[in-house]
Image (spheres, rainbow, N blue to C red):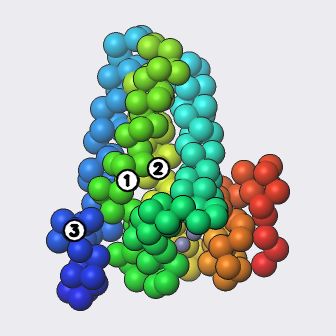
Amino acid sequence: MKTQIVKAGWPWLGVFHPALPLALWGPIAVACIVWGVVSHSLDLAMTSAIGAAALLVWSLVEYLVHRFLLHPPGRVERLSRWAQFAHGVHHDAQDEPIHTLVPPVNAAFILLPFLALFFWLVPVRAFAVFVGFFLAGYLAYEYVHYAMHHRDPQSRLGKYVRRHHLTHHAHGRAGNFGVSTPLWDWMLGTRLRS
Ligand SMILES: [Zn+2]
Ligand SMILES: [Zn+2]
């Protein structure tokens, strides 16, 4: 584990533990949801609707970031170098736990611009709850992805999601960009057959 930490360098600031993303972003997500519900007196139906919308938006962001930012098309050299640093190392060594989770610096780099965008796009009344569920979607992605590489799911759904992602690794990064859900691969025609 020590050599893995050294290899990963500054993104994990010398500390790697699988619970770190949850410890960093989990309290922010919960605080946003609780504060949003209380301060805007949202009922259960409204909170659920905002949450479902945020999770759907997260799943699309996950797909688009993986497809276009982490596997950049063409020769955008600087972006390709960053993508190799942020994600290529995971493809090169997919069994290394430290490369399965997104380093906090990279997660902030990807998440913060979207949160700024939502500040403009999402109604004030829904903003905090939306952000909370969006971050929950991000955390779900992290741990679904971790489980796909380091656990052996027994349920039919778990086996399907695992096969979907491992096919992405096996087939030259040509498709299956959705990790926590295959929804957008179905919708946008990038589903690979295993
Ligand atoms: Zn993977
Ligand atoms: Zn990939």
Is 85 drawn above or below residue 120 in the view shown?
A: below
Q: Earlier in the sequence, mark 2 or mark 3?
A: 3
Q: Earlier in the sequence, mark 3 or mark 1?
A: 3
Residue type, label 1: Ala
How packed mark 2 is, by other alpha carbons closer than 10 Å (few <14, some 14-19, many 20 or more), is many
Instruction: State yes or no: discs 2 and 3 in contact (Cβ < 8 Å).
Output: no
> Where ligand 1 lies, by image quadrant?
bottom right
Distance, label 3 to label 1, CA atoms, is 13 Å
Asked if ligand 1 lies within 8 A of label 1, the reply is no
Along the viewing direction, whichever of 83 and 78 lies nearer the viewer: 78
- Please state, as top left, top right, bottom left or bottom right, where the C terminus lies in the image: bottom right
For residue 107, the mark is: 1
Extreme left residue here?
A: 14
Q: Is disc 1 placed on a helix, strand or loop?
A: helix
**In the image, residue 179 lies at what x, y percent?**
60, 61
- Asked if residue 81 lies left or right of residue 66, the reply is left
Residue type, label 3: Trp
**In the image, residue 4 lies at what x, y percent?**
28, 84
Residue 80 visible somewhere in the drawing: yes
Residue indicated by mark 3: 10
**In the image, residue 73 lies at what x, y percent?**
64, 62
Instruction: State yes or no: discs 2 and 1 in contact (Cβ < 8 Å).
Output: yes
Residue 126 visible somewhere in the drawing: no
How packed mark 1 is, by other alpha carbons closer than 10 Å (few <14, some 14-19, many 20 or more), is some
Q: Is disc 3 placed on a helix, strand or loop?
A: helix
For residue 138, the mark is: 2
The structure residue drawn at horizontal position 78% and vertical position 64%, both measured from the top left corner, is 191
- Asked if residue 163 lies left or right of residue 88, the reply is right
The structure residue drawn at horizontal position 80% and vertical position 49%, both measured from the top left corner, is 187
Is 41 drawn above or below residue 185 in the view shown?
A: above
